Structures are given as C-alpha cells and as structure tokens.
Amino acid sequence: MADGIWQARGVVKGRAQGKALVSQTALSFLGDLDIRSGKVVGRSSDLLGTCVAGRVLVLPASRGSAGAWRFLYQLKVHGTHPAALILRDLPDPSVTQGAILAEVPIVVDPEAAFWTDLRDGDMVQVNGDSGCIARC
C-alpha cells in the first residue's frame, strides 16, 4: 500500500467519492434500509439510525435476497443511495445487479492494511474499474 492507497478487486465499474461509513456487521438492502431516507433501520446493524446517502459504505458482507437489487435501485431513484460499496466478501448477486442498475461502484477484498488504516468518516475515492481505493 502506498500512503492512503489500497488495492482491491473491482466488481461493479464506476468511480465515486464520499466519506467512509464503516460497519462491522453485514447489511441487507432488503429490509435494513429505508429507501426514502437512506437511513439504516435494521436492528441487527451497528449502523442503526445512520444515513448511507452519498457515503462510501464499508461492510464485511452484504446479506441479500432475490429482491435486494430493487431496493438498491430504489435508493438511487430517491437519491438516498450510497456512493460506493467496499466489501470484504463478494456481494450477493442481487446486490451486484442493483449496483449495476444504480451505478454504484463495488470493490471487494481490499488488502489487509485497508481494514486497520481506514477510519469512519475518512474521505475516499473508489475506482470500480481498477479496484483502487484512495484516501483523499
């Protein structure tokens, strides 16, 4: 890792920038988020009550279902979607489909230093084409 630059694997192409919103728990786009406000409403999430709109959502994993794509896309329609997703594990296929439709870049499996160096609220750029994550 160069200073504040980490390599990951791009899953959904695109580029985005925003403040990191770091969670230690998996999140479901179907049921854990209010699509109109972008707030986390799922009680199993450590982000309960926070808003994902415009943030780079950093998660260990996504919890998906066949309909998760629709909710991620609806977040985009309402302007309450995250800017990008950074995940430790590959997302559920439905989440990937929703991110493609909503134009939300996804990168996965960042190098180990990322998980100890990044702090909640850090401004980061995500490049889903190259898999690069950079602190701004």
Image (spheres, rainbow, N blue to C red):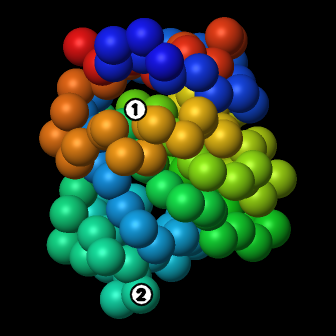
> Residue 85's x, y, as percent?
51, 40
Q: Quadrant of the C terminus?
A: top left
Residue at figure coordinates x 61%, y 51% from the top left: 88
Question: How crowded is the residue under tag 2: few (<14 C-alpha within 10 Å), some, or many (20+)?
Answer: few
Give left or right: position of 134 versus 50. right
Name the residue carrying label 2: 44
- The amino acid sitting under disc 1 is Ala
Outermost residue toward the bottom in this view? 43
Name the residue carrying label 1: 83
Marker count (numbered) = 2
Residue at figure coordinates x 76%, y 43% from the top left: 97
Q: Nearer the viewer, residue 72 or 55?
A: 55
Depicted 1 relative to depicted 58: above or below: above
> Residue 115's x, y, as percent?
43, 46
Residue 107 sits in quarter: top right
- The amino acid sitting under disc 2 is Ser
Give left or right: position of 54 versus 112. left
Under circle 1, the secondary element is: loop
Q: Nearer the viewer, residue 22 or 79?
A: 22
Depicted 135 relative to depicted 99: above or below: above
